[in-house]
Amino acid sequence: GRAGWTMSRLKVWLVTIGEMLPVEKSCRRMRTSMLADRLAARGHDVVWWTSAFDHFRKDWLFGKDAEVPVNDRLKLRALKGTGYRKNVSFGRIIDHRVIAWKFRKRIREAERPDVIIASTPPHDLAFEAVAFAKENSIPVLVDVRDQWPDIFLDAVPNALRAAVRLSMHKDFRIIEAAMRRANGLLAPTEAFLQWGLGYAKRERGWRDRVFPIGYMRHKGTPYAGRLLDLFEPMKDKFIVSFVGAIAGRYHNPMIMIDAARSLSALKDIHFVVAGDGELFGALKEASRDLDNVTLTGWLDQDEISFVLGRSKVGICPSAKPVDLPTNKTFSYLSEGLPVVSSFDGDLKSLIEKRGIGLHYRPGDIEAFADCIKRLYDYPGLYAEMSLNASRTFDALFDADKIYDEYARHIEKVAHGMSRPKWGKDLF
């Protein structure tokens, strides 16, 4: 771009549900939240269209549709759906349908934005944002966060996939239309971007970009809460931590319980599962006779930072092969923690190319335990991987750098679309 180039003040719509919102105590800053902060800091007015439902705790943040000012530059427009109990469920599909329907109604009376960034999932909400943008000649980008509705095929036996695809034929048409009609596609990984371009049926263009999720280093006050007493007995231990939502489908830390049992003779190794979710009850039952496992339950951002600051290794466990971005990786790297992961794709490549940890096959308890033992037994290897983790975070995953560039890209797209005489060669 032009040296020193800046964008005039924009009205930006962010259309994303399923994230923690900056109205909650010690909110975990996720992708849209960090982007909203950066856009506001650059002088733009941001409206974040979202859900009144807390995706993580499965509870209501607002009892009805709500408009909530966060600061002078950022406003939330929360829409109330039906709620749901499980992440991969028809209850969630219904909830998203209701929100998409409400969104379509509400935006007709809202002040028009200069640019729209819509996330998928949910694909129907992204479709409504794209359709509205095209009707009103507004540039629109779709940020591909997950491979919906494809994941519903993965969730059923092979024999049922054809039937499920047939029953969801409308969903597949919706995602194709959203991808094809968007002015550009964004994604946290190259694999997700290519998946989106496949539905768009076109080659990559200048508006299509990969922006990793990244992580913002916590700058809060020293921690003085409930975890101090919990962690006191393990202050000299080699702590192996999983931090995040215990979702079951992708992030399944049950293998940590099995490894804790097999490594119980090594008294210095302690496993911590920090988070809550669908598998929490099963994890608690499976670990009740183990004194080398601690389950913390739900954590706020200050507590997450406390746990990571006292951990030695970060875990990204999946029960089956999957290529997904995972937020927890970046939080681990920010504290210099080597990563032990069973995720394929971008994360596996990162581990192999940059030496930031170890990879094991999904569900292979013996291999997982061996990874932990290697990092414990070889301080030199551990120190090297820890240094690589810190360097990799600084080079690739510092959210301050990522979201400043993301915001600049939005400005370029908005400017290029609104003033076509400049031409695409400018950028």
Image (cartoon, grey):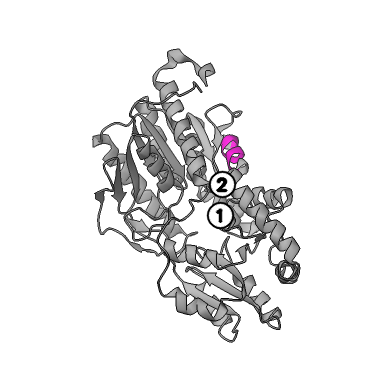
For the residues bearing labels 2 and 1, Cβ distance under 8 angstroms: yes
Dominant SS of magenta comes to: helix
Mark 1 is on which residue type?
A: Ser
Mark seen at residue 274: none
Q: Magenta residues, as a range?
A: 192-198
Instruction: In this rendered view, identify the residue nearer to me: 125 or 22.
Output: 22
Q: Position of residue 77 (x, y in %)?
A: 29, 46
Q: Disc number at residue 397?
A: 2
Tell me, yes or no, whether the highlighted magenta stretch contains residue 360: no
Q: Secondary structure at mark 2?
A: helix
Indicate whether residue 195 is drawn in magenta.
Answer: yes
Between 52 and 10, the one nearer to me in the picture: 10
Q: Position of residue 238 (x, y in %)?
A: 63, 72
Q: Position of residue 105 (x, y in %)?
A: 28, 41
Element carrying mark 1: helix
Determine whether 7 is above or below 363 in the image: above
Side of 361 where 330 appears, left or right: left
**Does residue 111 appear left or right of residue 192 in this picture?**
left
User: For this rendering, which residue is in front, 141 or 347?
Assistant: 347
**Label 2 vs 1, first from the N-terminus:** 1
Q: Residue furthest bottom?
A: 289
Number of numbered discs: 2
The residue that appears at 62% across and 66% down in the rendered structure is: 312
Number of residues whose C-alpha sits closer than 10 Å to that of mark 1, classed few (under 14), some (14–19) or many (20 or more): many
Crowd rating for badge 2 (residues with CA inside 10 Å; few <14, some 14–19, many 20+) = many
Residue 56 lies in quadrant: bottom left
> Which residue bears the numbered disc 1?
334
Disc 2 marks a residue whose amino acid type is Phe
